[in-house]
Image: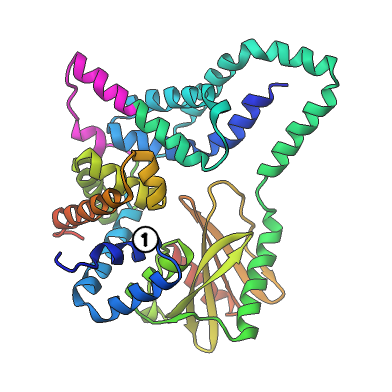
Amino acid sequence: MDDRRQRFEALALPHMDAAYNLARWLSRSPVEADDIVQDAMLRAFRAFDGFRGGDIKAWLLTIVRNCWLSTVVGSRRRAHTSLEDQELLATDASPEDTAIQAGTQRRMDLLIAQLAPEFREVLILREMEDLSYREIAEITGTPIGTVMSRLARARTQLRESAKEFL
Amino acid sequence: MSCDHILTTQSYLDGQLDGAQIDAAERHLQTCAECQTFAAQTADLSDALRRTTRHQAPEFLRARVRAALKREAAPTKARAFWWGAASGGGASALAAALALFLFLPPSAAGLAEAIADAHARALTSGHTIMVASSNHHVVKPWLAAHAGISPPAADFAAQGFVLTGGRTDTIAGRRAAVSVYAHGNHELDLFTWVDKSGSLPQSATVRGFRTAFWKEGDLNFAAVSDVDQAAFQKFIALARE
């Protein structure tokens, strides 16, 4: 049987939501997020023999981030695709949300999307993926001190811009 | 932000410190108004961020990725089969079975027992609370620092459930944050721990303790108490809000 693929799937696929969430928040586009995740999963599978244990989630998210970076470089070369705010606003409100909750959620989503990428990524990795500073430093390839100061700035900016409804 | 300790306070709130560092951060937090404000604001922001969208991979994408992986693995698949057939397929089948077994979540039934046990153990030892406070701005960061999880830890005093503090515990080998509530003479424990996959048991009464389980994102929640059914349901409704 195909043992290597089975091992990879058992380890990596449970982190598909984390991979997708990061891809989606970085690219801010559902279509791009699909491609980034598929690309990342394939790259990870090819590199799987080089994975020496440790934290598979952080390893996968590093690859997701790299795939996103290469799409950014690629799309800058082609043409700049601008962000449609409606795209951000249109999705994911569950029916049981009250109107107010949904409103707050959408506004928060939009404010996060407007953060600069280097602030957005540390915030997503910390607050949504519950990763440690060390893991975030690994994924983003920055020193821990930078992670800490970016996180503080991301939070301050977000709090400032969300002041009237938080 | 002008306090030199603000990044340390943030590390404390994010559960990134240990041992003596935690004590030092807590001592500082008791005396620094700026860091207290920062802690309260960060806790509020964190609550708000929990309600923002954590995007989930769509089903079709999972299928697409699986198919792509299968195609990618296809060339070696035939060889692997013949190798297995030639050199005793039993070994690789066994390895695959073991790998699957290792990734199985702890049994759901065992979980209800474990929660009831943990609750009973805390009650009999009298150590139900490690940090005593009815202020969620105190309990929440304490749990974040000591359990590495930041659960909601909201106070429902107006509805008859008073937040009395928090402690840490171990559930299914994972660190859990426990928010402790008082309802009359009864105690309710709300366990929170991180588990991405794993199935949860149905609500059940285990050795006289009511238990209920639910999931929010990658956080598992379990409520356990010996209060009556009506109060228990009311508490769960509040906690799940």
Q: Nearer the viewer, residue A60 or A133?
A: A133
Query: How far from the left and from the top, in percent, is residue A131?
Result: 42, 50
Lateral position of residue A111 relative to residue B96, left or right: left
Q: Look at the image and say whether residue A79 sits in the magenta stretch.
A: yes
Asked whether the viewer can see residue A95, the reply is no
Residue B144 picture quarter: bottom left
Q: Quadrant of the N terminus of chain A?
A: top right
Residue B222 at x, y percent in the picture: 55, 64
- The residue nearer to you, when weighing B116 against B203, is B116
* Magenta residues, dominant SS class: helix
Question: For the point 44% across and 32% down, which residue is it?
Answer: B58
Q: Is residue A38 above or below residue B3?
A: above
Q: How many marks?
A: 1
Which residues, given as a range, are shown in magenta?
Answer: A68-91
Residue located 19% across and 30% down the image = A84
Q: Residue at x 24, y 49 (%)?
A: A150
Chain ID at mark 1: B
- Is A36 displayed left or right of B182 in the figure? left
Quarter residue B31 falls in: bottom left
Residue B124 falls in image quadrant: bottom right
What residue is shown with label 1?
Answer: B14
**Is residue A6 covered in magenta?**
no
The kind of residue tagged 1 is Asp
Task: Estimate how packed mark 1 is, as few (under 14), some (14 to 19) or many (20 or more) residues with alpha carbons within 10 Å.
Answer: many
Residue A94 placement (x, y as % from top left): 37, 46
Q: Is residue B70 above or below residue B17?
A: above
Does residue A4 lie above or below B125 as drawn? above
